[in-house]
Image (cartoon, rainbow, N blue to C red):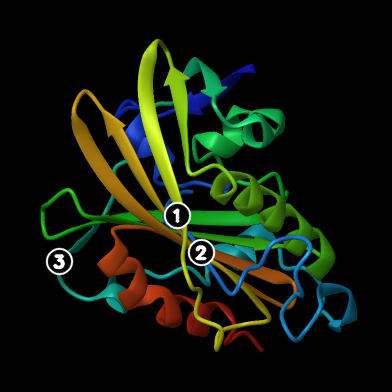
Amino acid sequence: MRVRVATTALGITAALLSLPACSAGTTGAKHQSPSAARTSKPADAVQNPASLSSAALESLLLDQRDLGSGYLPKPEHVAQHYDVTVLGCPALSKLGGNAATGGTLSFPRKAKTDFTYGGSSSEISEELYSDSAKKLSDGVARIFDAMTGCPTYEVVAGGTPVDVASQKLPAPHNLGDEQWSQLLTFTTAGRSTVVKQTAVRDGSLLLIVSGSPALVDRHLGKALAKATARS
């Protein structure tokens, strides 16, 4: 399937950091297959507060003070549009290149921030979405299921082939109502980048943290605590 998606000037690997769109990222599981049981709090059984606006979500994102020393906002780059083809994963190809290359999810109320760490190639990305619990649950589950359902596949963006390997990971079951997590390895021109992506739904709010595995593990709980501390 060939689609048009936006990627930054940093190239396909940078775009893939924000999967789901899910991501960004690294994956795995308290999330189970569609036929398996959901978390103990089904999306359609949770009483959700009203969805938050994009402006409200912006105020709930982690900032440099929350992250600590060594973190710098990642510069924004002018988006470039490339044709993207997904090969070797029919389920993901059916969803479109946006899911395979880390574009943002299609929920209208959203906010995102990106940071680099220690002047190195380590990065962390945080995304927040707000909608009904069922819509959030169904949307993110569909993409994680497709990605982790294909252990390996290829993405061709602007003529550049990127080999992708996906692995479902155990997600932190003590956070939120539902959790998903995966580990993605992107390889192009003999160089590989490993990205972890973990998503947590808490009522009508969805948090996705993607990037270097150690940074995702370090800041996931902090990100959820700030996002859900609203009155």
Residue 91 occupies quadrant: top right
Which type of secondary structure does the marked residue at label 2 adopt?
A: loop
Which type of secondary structure does the marked residue at label 1 adopt?
A: strand
Question: Residue 141: x, y in percent?
Answer: 69, 57
- For marks 2 and 3, the one nearer the N-term is 2
Judging by the rendered image, the residue that carries numbered circle 2 is 28
Q: Badges 1 and 3: C-beta atoms under 8 Å apart?
A: no
Residue toward you, 45 or 51: 45
Q: Amino acid at mark 3?
A: Gly
Q: Badges 2 and 1: C-beta atoms under 8 Å apart?
A: yes
In the rendered view, would you say 179 is above or below 163?
Answer: below
Q: Residues within 10 Å of mark 3 (few under 14, many from 20)?
A: few
Q: Amino acid at mark 2?
A: Gly
Say which residue appears at 68% left-offset and 81% top-offset.
177
Residue 92 occupies quadrant: top right
Quick check: 124 left or right of 61? left
Which type of secondary structure does the marked residue at label 3 adopt?
A: loop
Question: Residue 158: x, y in percent?
Answer: 42, 13
**Residue furthest out toward the left:** 119
Judging by the rendered image, the residue that carries numbered circle 3 is 70
Residue toward you, 43 or 73: 43
Question: Residue 214: x, y in percent?
Answer: 26, 68
Say which residue appears at 10% left-offset and 53% top-offset.
119
Q: Amino acid at mark 1?
A: Gln
